[in-house]
Amino acid sequence: MQTLSGMQRNLTYQTALLGLSYVIAYLIYISMSSIYLFLPPLLGVLFWHYRKALRQQNFSYLLMIVAMLLILEVEKGFLLFSSVVYLGLFQYIVVPKLQQYINCRGCLNFIYVALLYLGYLLFSWLIHQVFWMPLPSIDWYIVYYIVIEFLIVSTL
């Protein structure tokens, strides 16, 4: 009998399928969050994963997070790639300053989530004013979203 000791399974296909299933699940979730307003859009959770992908230097993981951010923008009516630009600016400008002055991990998580939502709304308002575009609808559940996503990010 001949043995095939040199054959191995290819795990890259499995991780690609897993990433694709995450994107499809997020697409379904974000569609439901437009119908049911008690479901947060998970911007803080996506930022946590964005930072994790940058720390691990995992390009495919980062690409998956960018795809999820683009789905969020399309569903909520924001300008294309605005959340990606905002997260990049937030990661490289705001996060180092906050880490320089605050050492409490829980405090940083709450500040990150709060500044993500409030800063992204301000950033999108500024972009829409510059390009003279109508501002997308902003619901007043933002405080609820901040609290729920802080609890989610704290458990990660």
Image (cartoon, helix red, strand yellow):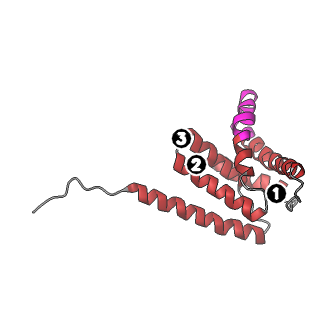
Q: Is label 2 in contact with label 3 (beta carbons under 8 Å)?
A: no
**Residue occupying image coordinates x 75% and y 39%:** 107
Of residue 106 and residue 67, the one placed in the foreground of this image is 67
**Residue occupying image coordinates x 68% and y 48%:** 47
**Residue occupying image coordinates x 83% and y 48%:** 118
Toward the front, the furthest residue is 131
Label 2: which residue? Answer: 62
What residue type is disc 1 on?
Answer: Tyr
Q: Is residue 33 left or right of residue 2?
A: right
Question: How busy is the neighbourhood of tag 3: few (under 14 within 10 Å), some, or many (20 plus)?
Answer: few
Judging from the image, what secondary structure is the residue with disc 2 in?
Answer: helix
Whether residue 26 is situated above or below residue 56 in the rendered picture: below
Toward the bottom, the furthest residue is 35
Q: Position of residue 132 (x, y in %)?
A: 90, 54
Is 126 within the magenta? no
Decide which of tag 1 and tag 3 comes sooner along the chain: 3
Q: Is label 1 in contact with label 3 (beta carbons under 8 Å)?
A: no
Question: Which residues are drawn in magenta?
Answer: 89-108
Is 92 within the magenta? yes
**Residue occupying image coordinates x 19% and y 58%:** 4
Judging from the image, what secondary structure is the residue with disc 1 in?
Answer: helix
Whether residue 79 is situated above or below residue 28 in the rendered picture: above
Q: Nearer the viewer, mark 1 or mark 2?
A: 2
Judging from the image, what secondary structure is the residue with disc 3 in?
Answer: loop
Q: Position of residue 105 (x, y in %)?
A: 69, 37
Toward the left, the furthest residue is 1
Q: Position of residue 90 (x, y in %)?
A: 73, 40
Q: Nearer the viewer, mark 1 or mark 3?
A: 3
What residue type is disc 2 on?
Answer: Leu
Q: Position of residue 152 (x, y in %)?
A: 68, 53
Q: Is residue 118 left or right of residue 112?
A: right
Label 1: which residue? Answer: 144
